[in-house]
Image (cartoon, rainbow, N blue to C red):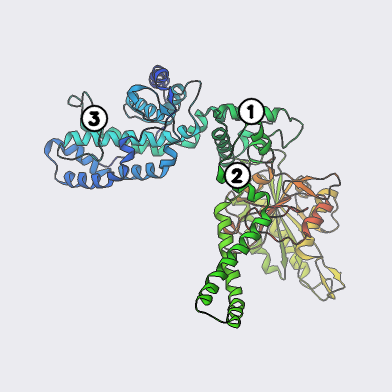
Amino acid sequence: MAYRFAARSMTVPSSQLQEPVAAASDDQGQHNCVHPDLPRAVPVWKHLDRMSAWLDEARRICRAPPPEVSKAAEWLLDNEYHVRRAVRQVREDMPPAFYRRLARSAWPEARGSPRVLLAARSYIDERHAQIDAATVTAFVNEFQGREGFSLAELWAVPAMLRLVALEEIVTTFCCLVPDLAPPFQGLERPGNWQDRDSTDALSRAIVALAAIERIDWKAFVEATSHVEAILRRSPDGLYPEIDFDTRDRYRQAIEDIAEGTGQSEPNIAREAVRMSRGHIGSPRQSHVGWWLVDGGRAEFEALTGYRSKHTEALRRLALRRPGWVYVTGLVGVAALALAVPLALLIDRDASGVALALGGLLLTMPALIIAMTVTNWLVTQIVPPRVLPKMDFRKGLPEGVEAAVIVPAIFRSPDEVAPVLAQLERHMLTNPDPLMHYALLSDPADAAQQVTDEDQALEAALIDGIRKLNRRYATSAPFVLLHRRRSWNEVDGIWMGWERKRGKIEAFNDFLHDGSGDAFPLTEGDVEGLRAARFIVTLDADTIAPPGAVHSLLGALAHPLNRAEFDAEGERVIAGYTVIQPRDRDIPASGGRFAVHPALHRRHCHRYLQPRSIRRLPGPFRRRDFHRKGGL
């Protein structure tokens, strides 16, 4: 009887919430005392690898079960995949290093078990294994009391619930089949096991495993975390608007600082918020992330008395002198790659000429090995830096108006329809009422300023944009900005000035200065386009995946990423003027995909003509007036 899941509302009656909450209130006083030692490895977790063999044996019994076990055997046989999936999930979610981070209960009857395991057992007992998001959230909020669970304990709740359910399945089935040896020791029969319906207990535990899969545990952690509640009181009010990954990164930083200072996580969070309140006038420093993951981290660590681990200290030392460390690594690996074969030649009594010739022949392979090994070591030692982002999945807020622009060159009217179809596809995959979709077009190079096909090309462009706006008349987001040819003395040809780069620079002038001279032919809501503060540039053959544009805009709109210029307005001293997805995020079409804020002309000019910068792997890079970030 494979378990079938019926769609149901997540709303739970208040009467059903009161029972587990009351039980949690009764339990939290005696269970919340923490012992300083590491938690004891409970048998069901310690011997989790034995569950697979036990399930194989249980399946063999279930194929020809005794009559009194037939219903329970049918349940286990039909839903075995739930059990195996839970075993795999616990193994992935709770490795030994993570388990050791959990607080050990000082309650004598817990016998050294993690405190969060006691909460999971108490919850399942009170709810009779009927698990849902609302009651587990209410129960944990009451159980953890004023001190609160650590973030690690909250993330361990789903794994602990699975362990309790697995323990119940093993206990019940082994009681029904005494000849079946349990996979771990310390298995205790419930005091009333002879009086209860074992089949019902088994089925409830299996249903509980399925219910655990349906709960959004990210939302659970944020709804129960005291650290999260404190960070949401940050003075700039932006913390709730950043995306989950960024919030989680802030919380991880608090975990790390708390571990390095011996203070509680809520105390570290309160101190970070206090530091933010002390810098209300600064958009960056008033954001709590500045003190946790950005430029204020060093000052915040000194304030809280943080002491980093040895490995972290070495990594930071390397990042302070990236050039020297990288070059030293190259030289060291290259010297080692040369030393081994040269030592063999010396051992064979090779002559000086043979050694010199061998050294020359081995230099290039040694350099290749050095580059490969050093770059690999950098990627292993230095974690990738992911930009913090705002969460714009529900739409762009006021003040983050944007435009998606597609620069294109047309040789004939027949080329217009495919490009307009691609522009429409961008709107459908990334729709937003505060976003315009503009086609920046040029006619192809020619020997004369006007050709016979120009009139037909312009008519096709205007007609195409009008059709799109009629199709989406509610927002009419499509705009055409078309240039005409100008004389290029160097090449001796009529062409659109500077082609793609010229169109983007002219577009920035159009946004800021209101000058439309570069685009004598326009169609659509041109004035509405001028409100754009961020520009997303897509090649004509680029495919923008759903949500990709909002993700890029969310990164650039984050307060820690917004471009900040020096007093002369010539050099970016913080933030980014342009960001671009990593290579693996660029669609297979081979197009280019970038986003940048609408810049003043001089900033745009410097963006379009950046200095050549040699980029070392990972974070080993120089700062210049042009800053570029990967997502």
Q: CA distance from mark 2 to mark 1?
A: 23 Å
Q: Earlier in the sequence, mark 3 or mark 1?
A: 3
Check disc 3: other Cα within 10 Å, few if <14, some if 14-19, many if 20+: few
In the shown orientation, is residue 280 left or right of residue 17?
right
- Near-viewer residue (552 or 456): 552
Tell me the amino acid under the disc marked 2: Ala
Disc 1 packing (10 Å; few <14; some 14–19; many ≥20): some
* Residue denoted by label 1: 271
Determine the secondary structure under disc 3: loop
Name the residue rendered at 55%, 74% in the picture: 342
Residue type, numbered disc 1 = Glu
Q: Nearer the viewer, mark 3 or mark 2?
A: 2
Spatial CA distance of label 3 from label 2 is 47 Å
In the rendered image, which residue does mark 2 sit on?
A: 313
Instruction: Characterize the local packing of mark 2: few (<14), some (14-19) or many (20 or more) Cα atoms within 10 angstroms.
Output: few
Given residues 180 and 528, the one toward you in this image is 180
Find residue 103 and report its image quarter. Answer: top left
- Secondary element under disc 1, as helix, strand or loop, is helix
Q: Amino acid at mark 3?
A: Glu
Residue tagged 3 = 188
**Could you tell me which residue is drawn at 36 percent across and 45 percent down?**
88
Outermost residue toward the front in this view: 349
Q: Residue at x 66, y 60 (%)?
A: 327
Where does the image place residue 557, in percent across and percent down from the top left?
69, 43
The answer to whether residue 467 is seen in the rendering is no
Between disc 3 and disc 2, whose residue precedes?
3
